[in-house]
Amino acid sequence: MMSVLLRVEGVTKIFGHQKALDEFSFDLKSGEIHCFVGENGAGKSTFIKILSGALSPDSGRIFYEGKEYSHFTPDESMGLGISTMYQDVELIETLTVADNIFLGNEITGLFGKIDTYSQNRKAREIMDRLSISLNETLLVEDLSAAQKQILQIVKAFHMQAKVLIMDEPTSSLGQEETKALMEMIKDLKKRGIGIIYISHYLEEVFEIGDRITILKDGHYEGTYRADEITVEEVIRKMVGRDAELFFNRAPVQIGKVMIEVKNFSRHGVVDDVSFQVHRGEIFGIGGLVGAGRTELINLIFGIDKKDSGELCIKGRNVEIKNPSQAINAGICLITEDRKQFALLGDRSVRENVILVYNEVFNRRMIKKKDEILIVGKMIRKLQIAVSDQEQSVLSLSGGNQQKTVIARLLLSKSDIYIFDEPTKGVDIGAKEEIYKLMVQLAGEGKCIIMISSDMPELISMSDRIGVMRNGKMAYILPGKNVKEEELIEYFIGVK
């Protein structure tokens, strides 16, 4: 009989006014694959970070091998045998396979020098026990995506992990690579390791899972044996929200084609994607993690180089090789990661708002008096809650930081606006203000491309929805009357 390794009771985590996890309970047995499903934003990542020690819960209890904890520190979590494989592989590319296995726990010889021979030999012994044929002397940068995932499992095995948390481990793998990883996970289960497996790919969940726990908007929706629930029932429990969560947007007249993407490709991430967006239209793009949504936008905006394809704006072919050319062609990008890619963190609100305006209009002589008038007008227009224009932009709330980025791009007088996760990390009030602004832009004849993982946002804001899957634009659906359950089925390939 399998014993309970890990149990959490009533765990709650709050960020600002939002409960990322609300009174969540969960347990994991030794030798069990317990699958964890839910949409983006359901609370899965928050739970992983609590177990790995990256976050502390605001309330609730954690029991590990019968002992109670209020929270874990990262060292404590690893020391207890909890190993986390994040979606983004955490390996040192310039070190060998063996070096990565023993990283932080190196085998040393005389004068503390790393004993490379012994590390290679022991790494080979560990991988032989797991029937893995990786060459221990290869650099990690020379491994495939699947081999890197397998190497993370080897590291966990070497550290004598009792609990292995796997976050979307197959999102960047092909069919054969996924099959090999599935077999390895089944082998780990036989060795008594408890596995928390997080995936949007429900066919994988039903192939390897013993139990399935469903989260929706931070709330626990139930735990089921995999053989007592269907894919359709899981999807219904993952979605299905109250009508008030959907924004009721005003209709806008749609005009001629503004931008056309023709046969865009970049090896391994985007595959022959084509679509058009019209004046006054909000074209939503949805899909699972790793589907290629942001990668496609990076090609359009010139952040990454495409292998093939054409871009047509207002009927004219345009070659965009970098973001500056994109801005000059009338395209603006409101990026998902505003802190890393959009905000000048050590600068004021004024400097952040005026940035693109000065560049687009070639202002060599910058007059602060003019800037103050222009920025003040944008602060009032977007209702940015700021005490002073010289206030640090990082001191603002998430919603006001996002509105600062939008204010900057509105000053560019562009025709095409790309919003990548426009309301990520903002509160409900700020969400509605951003939605109204997007509709206003559409009403002015602008065209909007919106990438979103928020299902109510995608459905209520989009005139049409492009479904990305495995780097392809698999479907283009009318936004009106599409249901959440249907959209999830399109995302995962049930339809």
Image: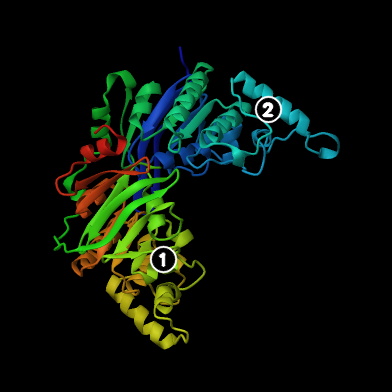
Viewer-side residue, 87 vs 80: 87
Mark 2 vs 1, N-terminal side:
2
Residue marked by disc 1: 396
x and y, in percent, of residue 87 in the image:
47, 40
Residue for point 53% across, 34% down: 149
Picture quarter containing residue 288? top left
Q: How is the image coloured?
A: rainbow
- For disc 1, the neighbor class at 10 Å (few under 14, some 14 to 19, many from 20) is some
Q: Does any portion of residue 492 appear in the rendered image?
A: yes
User: How crowded is the residue under tag 2: few (<14 C-alpha within 10 Å), some, or many (20+)?
Assistant: many
- Point 47% across, 20% down: residue: 186
The N terminus - image quarter: top left
**Disc 2 secondary structure class:** helix
Check disc 1 and give the amino acid type.
Leu
Is residue 137 found left or right of 68 in the rendered image? Answer: right
Give the residue furthest to the top.
1
Residue 279 placement, left or right of 25:
left
Instruction: Inspect the image, locate mark 2, and give the three-letter code of the amino acid beneath it.
Output: Ala
- Residue 291: x and y in percent read 37, 43
Q: Is residue 162 left or right of residue 211?
A: right
In the rendered view, would you say 410 is above or below 112? below
Image point (41%, 26%), residue name: 34
| Badge 2 vs badge 1, beta-carbon distance below 8 Å | no
Vertical relation: 350 (above or below) 401: below
In the picture, the disc for residue 123 is: 2
Q: Position of residue 187 (x, y in %)?
A: 51, 19
